[in-house]
Every structure is written in C-alpha cells, then in structure tokens.
Image: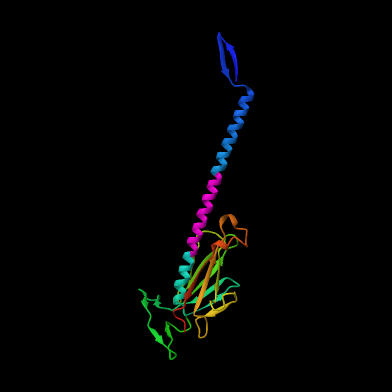
Amino acid sequence: MKLSPLNGVPFRAAFTLVETMISLTVGGIILGGMILSFTTFQQVFAGVDDYYRATSDQMRVLDFIGQDMRRAISGAVSNSTKTLTLTLPDYIDESQNPPVPRTAAVAAAGTVTYGTKGVQPTAVYTISGAAPDQTITRVYTPTTGSATTTTLTMASANYQFACLNPSNPGSTANFSFGGAGQPTSVTVQLTFQPKFNRFNFVNARTATLISSTILLRNHL
C-alpha cells in the first residue's frame, strides 16, 4: 500500500495496481472454488438420490415377481433374452360387471383350473430400453381384454435380472417350472449400475445385487 500527500493531508492510503491484481486473483480463486464445490455437492447428491431410488425399484420388482410367482400355475425363464413368463390362475371373471370369482374345476389328476383350461392370464417381465437406461416392465395379459404394461423401475439405471434354478445355481440356462418334476422354487436376482459407474459393465453391479428364492405354491 502506498501513502501519498493530498490537499494538505499528509498521507492517504491506496492500493497499487499490483495489489489490486493480486486481490482480484485471490478472490477469483476463492469464488471458483466455491462454485466448484457447489457443483460437486450437487452431483454427489444426485448420485446418492439415484442410488437409493434404484434400490427402491429393486424391492418393487421383487415384490411384483414374488406375488405373481407364488400364485403362478407354471412359468418359463429365458435368461438369454432376460424374460420371465408366468401363467397365472384366472380367479376373476373380468368380463362380468361387476367382476365375479370364477368357479374352480378339479381335474381327475387333482389339479385345479380356474376359467378355461389352457387359456390363462400371463405376466411377462422383460427389460426395456438400451444401456445405460434399461428399465424392467411387467406386461399383464388377461384372458379377455387388452394387455397392460407397467414400468416397475422409475430410475434409469441399466437394470438386469436373472432367474436361476436353486438346484443348479451355477447355471444360467433357460428352464421351465410348475410342471411335474420341474423346480419347486426359483431364485430371482436383480442388479443395477450406480450413476457414476454406468459404463463399467464388469464391476459396477457387484454391490447392487439382491436376490430372493421364491417358493411356487401352486407347483404340481
């Protein structure tokens, strides 16, 4: 700081050009750091929020699959195409107004059929979209009327699911269940990719795997 006489006043304080430039530089660095910190915190918040939304989606998908699979008559798993197809009992006659419960027919073999044998509702779980924004959908097709598609995952986190035979857990081969001699339970596994690791296809899923082994209550 330079002191100089002015109008009889002995001295007056003032900043030199160098001091001003240094001050502006320091202030710019501080301001830039604050902006960078704010942006980073926003990104971290978005990543954490995305992660917890994805975990909530996982539980929702398991709830839907568990509910359908426990009451399913039969089903088929295609791990190659990431598709789970469930044949459901036709408990309700939705062609009536209001809908009414169907009468159960018992076959000679002791099996119970609701509605028309061989014509039953289906629920198909598939993966839709392209990576890294894949979602899981459920398509319900009743015996009468049009199919209904429900997107079960709200976040776009490149979801994957696999259904395994608990008797052969190391195999990802396609298989059917619900018939005589077929599996009595199915293990469902779901994973997703966190927001900041969407393109790390090998390791990004490691900490996101959840699974549930579901017993088939209507197994023959």
User: In the image shown, does 149 or 39 lie closer to the viewer?
Assistant: 39
Figure check: 41 above or below 197: above
Q: How many numbered marks are there?
A: 0
User: In the image shown, does 99 or 170 lie closer to the viewer?
Assistant: 170
Give the colouring mode of the picture. Answer: rainbow
Which residue is outermost to the right?
A: 18
Q: Magenta stretch containing residue 21, yes or no?
A: no
The magenta segment is 39-58
Q: Residue 94, percent across and down? A: 40, 75
User: In the image shown, does 55 or 1 lie closer to the viewer?
Assistant: 1
Figure check: 3 above or below 160: above
Q: Residue 85, percent across and down? A: 52, 75
Quarter occupied by residue 29: top right
Which residue occupies 52% across, 71% down? 188
Q: Magenta stretch containing residue 47, yes or no?
A: yes
Which residue occupies 61% across, 31% down? 25
| Dominant SS type (magenta) | helix
Q: Where does the N terminus fall, quadrant-wise?
A: top right
